[in-house]
């Protein structure tokens, strides 16, 4: 198992979706709260939302649920934090992006290309001795891809950390489908 | 066209509009521009000798007035000197505004002279802080700061002002309440308790057979002392007042059991321990109260009223959590209880419980062995004499250590806002500057600072401030030549191996030191000298007085629940230990 697949394989991981005011220092405040209580942030993704005044921070934490309750309450005390939702991995859609440069001689390159195609990834750059590929998808899928690439020799790898939104419930999805048909 | 003013002028004008009457501070390079318009302002500035003093003065002021204390200092070392008072105010939920200078925006991040990352350093010790990057933002930031510091769970807010922001021109605009609220979409403290929870609490109170009201500092913050008294009398239930709540319920009230906790009295500790319902009001199950958490009040159901949702379930999971302002919630609980009673419900008979509690009180009064002739002066005796001679309404401040615990134990606090101390952080040196701030806030009151010889040496220089600014306070130093509380622990838990706790019997000369700072200095070495010295101190009101009591170094604070012990295993004074069985 790859070293960074912990969050997707471990049942105690939590995804917090934190809506904050888009201002300097907010990320430091949020991260500081986790650090002070000795929690490791597994991954973190930050970007402005549809409202440019607000940013969404998606945090994956590997803690048991009861101390997390305390962190969430403390987080909510930060003046810049507008809303916090804990996303249940079973009821949310998660996506992550992976980029990797793999050292592979020209004659074996086809295998990596094939693997990337199977996973529906992209070839970003090709060199004589190396190839850079990318894959966007669920963190589980990225874990599998990463493990298979490892056999070829990964030179550099970067994952973005996951972003997540709640799954639409069935009713909302059907309504959306009907609406789509009508228009 | 609106007239342009500078960011500094806007700052001072904004402070005036927030009804600030006093700033405690010390100027320096980057805050210089703010000190110029201060000359033309009605705001009184008190020039301290060390920035930490300014911070504790602001705290003392806030403690006794309920209004936020304001401290203003420059960048770099001045800002780092404010870290202790900020943390102290944060731990004890004291509303406080701290204004720091900062290097010009163009120099931030260049390791400029007296630059430090003030906002970064103080992030974890403030309720909120802001680096203001534009002069136009000054009024809104000041309004936000006062709003945040004084609402919800109060706390310190720091504003960091770069020198060019203070110097730049801006167009004055004083934001409306609505603008302030709109600018803080993430800040909405809940003040009204949940009606269903309040009903449930009322029912639980009527059903309890061994109830205790566990009152914390939140009572004072919420100005809920009257409501607390009404509730306690309505349900005829004993009240314990934590270190932060001394005075929130009158010590001379028959229902008052006094202070629980590590150095609480045996009755208050045991009443919590044996209770079947803790009506927790603005208290936070601090480790100094609970002792070993796993064995704390094992049979008690918990009603927990606190304005800070993060306190609910942090240490002990409540059966009925109520987030809200203590005063509003208590008033609602009273109403709900009256409704139930009017509807024909009856409160359980708690007379057996109350007589059990009275039995403990009779058996375990606070105790120390009285002086035999020729023996060293007992610190508790000095405090009792001080208490009995204190003019009506005296405010008592203390530092941290044995003298603090004896003060809380032996004083009679019959009025709220007459006790000022550093509870959560335990800041040695708090007493003298806090007393000065308290006297500024309540010039009509006598202010006594009880201090240890260790504490006094940390911040005594502020007595110069007191003399120069004509703020007459009274200081009682209980001088045992030791870091007394640490000595007590070494005696009890380190086999009397005294390591680095002996200060000096002769140095400094506290009387001469006091005199050199413009105060009257008095030394007391024997019991006969105690009363005349206190009378003399109380009769002087045109300058500060320092009374040094040379006290018995061997005296220890009892009762004691050592760290990690269960409250069941409270250590009584050895002379009372033979009656231990009564605590069952």
Image (tube, coloured by chain):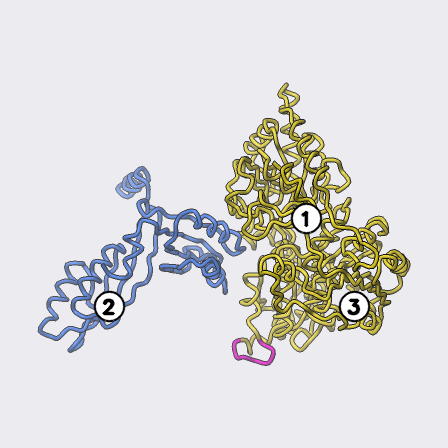
Q: Who's the residue at 58% across and 62% down the image? A: B129
User: In terms of secondary structure, where does tag 1 sit?
Assistant: loop
Q: Give chain B's shade.
A: yellow
Residue under label 3, please give it: B463
Distance (Cα) linking label 1 and label 2 = 70 Å
Q: Give chain A's shade.
A: blue
Pick the front one: B25 or B484: B484
Chain part drawn in magenta: B109-115
Distance (Cα) linking label 3 and label 1 = 36 Å
Quarter assignment of residue A168: top left
Instruction: Tell me which secondary structure the magenta stretch mostly adopts.
Output: loop
Q: Is residue B112 above or below residue A122?
A: below
Q: Do the residues marked 3 and 2 share a common chain?
A: no
Read off the chain for label 2.
Answer: A
Q: Do the residues marked 1 and 2 share a common chain?
A: no
Q: Are marks 3 and 2 in contact (CB under 8 Å)?
A: no
Residue under label 2, please give it: A100
Residue B573, disc: 1
Q: Quadrant of the C terminus of chain B?
A: top right
Query: Looking at the image, can residue B5 be seen?
Result: no
On the image, the x and y values in percent for residue B493 come to 58, 58
Residue, far left:
A107
Q: Is A177 covered by the magenta stretch?
A: no
Q: Residues within 10 Å of mark 2 (few under 14, many from 20)?
A: many
Read off the chain for label 3.
Answer: B
Q: Tell how many labels.
A: 3
Q: Who's the residue at 54% across and 55% down the image? A: A79
Q: Nearer the viewer, mark 1 or mark 2?
A: 1
On the image, the x and y values in percent for residue B504 come to 72, 71
Q: Nearer the viewer, mark 3 or mark 2?
A: 3
Pick the front one: B193 or B533: B533
């Amino acid at each position: 198992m790859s070293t960074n697949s912990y969050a997707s394989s471990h049942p105690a991981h939590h995804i917090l979706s934190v809506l904050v005011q888009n201002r300097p220092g907010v990320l430091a405040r949020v991260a500081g709260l986790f650090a002070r209580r000795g929690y490791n942030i597994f991954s973190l993704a930050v970007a402005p939302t549809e409202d440019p005044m607000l940013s969404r921070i998606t945090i994956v934490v590997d803690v048991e649920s009861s101390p997390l309750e305390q962190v969430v309450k403390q987080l909510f005390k930060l003046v810049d934090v507008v809303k916090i939702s804990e996303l249940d991995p079973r009821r949310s859609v998660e996506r992550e992006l992976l980029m990797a440069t793999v050292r592979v001689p020209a004659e074996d390159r086809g295998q990596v290309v094939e693997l990337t195609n199977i996973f529906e990834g992209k070839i970003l750059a090709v060199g004589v001795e190396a190839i850079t590929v990318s894959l966007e998808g669920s963190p589980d899928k990225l874990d599998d891809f990463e493990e298979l690439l490892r056999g070829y020799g990964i030179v550099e790898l970067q994952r973005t950390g996951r972003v997540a939104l709640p799954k639409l419930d069935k009713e909302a999805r059907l309504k959306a489908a009907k609406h789509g048909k009508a228009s | 066209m609106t007239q342009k003013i500078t960011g500094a002028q806007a700052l001072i004008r904004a402070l005036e509009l927030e009804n600030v009457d006093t700033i405690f501070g010390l100027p320096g390079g980057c805050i210089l521009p703010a000190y110029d318009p201060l000359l033309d302002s009605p705001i009184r500035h008190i020039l301290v000798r060390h920035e930490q003093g300014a911070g504790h003065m602001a705290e003392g002021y806030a403690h006794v007035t309920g209004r936020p204390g304001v401290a203003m200092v420059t960048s770099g070392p001045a800002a780092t000197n404010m870290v202790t008072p900020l943390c102290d105010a944060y731990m004890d939920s004291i509303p406080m505004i701290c204004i720091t200078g900062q290097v010009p925006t163009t120099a931030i991040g260049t390791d400029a002279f007296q630059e430090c990352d003030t906002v970064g350093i103080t992030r974890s010790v403030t309720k909120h802080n802001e680096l203001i990057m534009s002069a136009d933002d000054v009024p809104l930031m000041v309004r936000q700061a006062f709003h945040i510091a004084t609402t919800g769970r109060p706390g310190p807010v720091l504003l960091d002002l770069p020198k060019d922001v203070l110097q730049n021109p801006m167009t004055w605009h004083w934001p409306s309440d609505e603008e302030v609220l709109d600018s803080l979409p993430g800040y909405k403290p809940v003040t009204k308790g949940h009606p269903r929870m309040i009903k449930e609490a009322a029912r639980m109170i009527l059903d309890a057979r061994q109830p205790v009201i566990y009152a914390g500092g939140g009572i004072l913050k919420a100005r809920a002392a009257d409501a607390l008294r009404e509730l306690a009398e309505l349900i005829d239930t004993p009240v314990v007042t934590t270190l932060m709540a001394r005075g929130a319920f009158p010590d001379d009230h028959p229902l008052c059991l006094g202070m629980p906790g590590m150095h609480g009295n045996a009755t208050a500790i045991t009443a919590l321990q044996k209770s079947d319902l803790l009506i927790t009001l603005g208290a936070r199950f601090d480790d100094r109260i609970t002792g070993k958490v796993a064995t704390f009040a094992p049979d008690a159901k918990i009603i927990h009223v606190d304005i800070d949702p993060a306190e609910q379930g942090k240490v002990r999971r409540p059966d009925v959590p109520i987030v809200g302002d203590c005063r509003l919630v208590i008033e609602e609980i009273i109403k709900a209880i009256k409704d139930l009673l009017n509807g024909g419900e009856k409160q359980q008979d708690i007379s057996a419980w109350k007589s059990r509690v009275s039995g403990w009180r009779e058996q375990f009064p606070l105790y120390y062995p009285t002086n035999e002739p020729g023996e060293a002066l007992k610190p508790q005796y000095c405090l009792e004499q001080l208490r009995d001679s204190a003019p009506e309404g005296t405010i008592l401040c203390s530092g941290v250590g044995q003298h603090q615990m004896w003060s809380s134990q032996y004083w009679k606090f019959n009025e709220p806002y007459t006790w000022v101390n550093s509870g959560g952080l335990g800041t040695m040196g708090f007493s003298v500057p806090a007393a000065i701030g308290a006297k500024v806030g309540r010039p009509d009151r006598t202010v006594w600072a009880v201090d240890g010889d260790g504490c006094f040496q940390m911040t005594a220089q502020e007595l110069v401030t007191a003399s120069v600014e004509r703020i007459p306070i009274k200081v009682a130093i209980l001088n045992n030549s030791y870091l007394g509380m640490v000595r007590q622990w070494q005696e009890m838990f380190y086999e009397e191996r005294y390591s680095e706790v002996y200060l000096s019997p002769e140095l400094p000369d506290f009387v001469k030191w006091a005199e050199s700072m413009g105060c009257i200095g008095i030394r007391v070495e024997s019991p006969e000298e105690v009363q005349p010295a206190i009378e003399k101190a109380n009769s002087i009101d045109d300058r500060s007085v320092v009374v040094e009591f040379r006290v018995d170094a061997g005296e220890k604070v009892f009762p004691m629940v050592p760290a990690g012990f269960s409250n069941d295993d409270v250590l009584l004074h050895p002379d009372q230990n033979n009656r231990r069985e009564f605590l069952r």
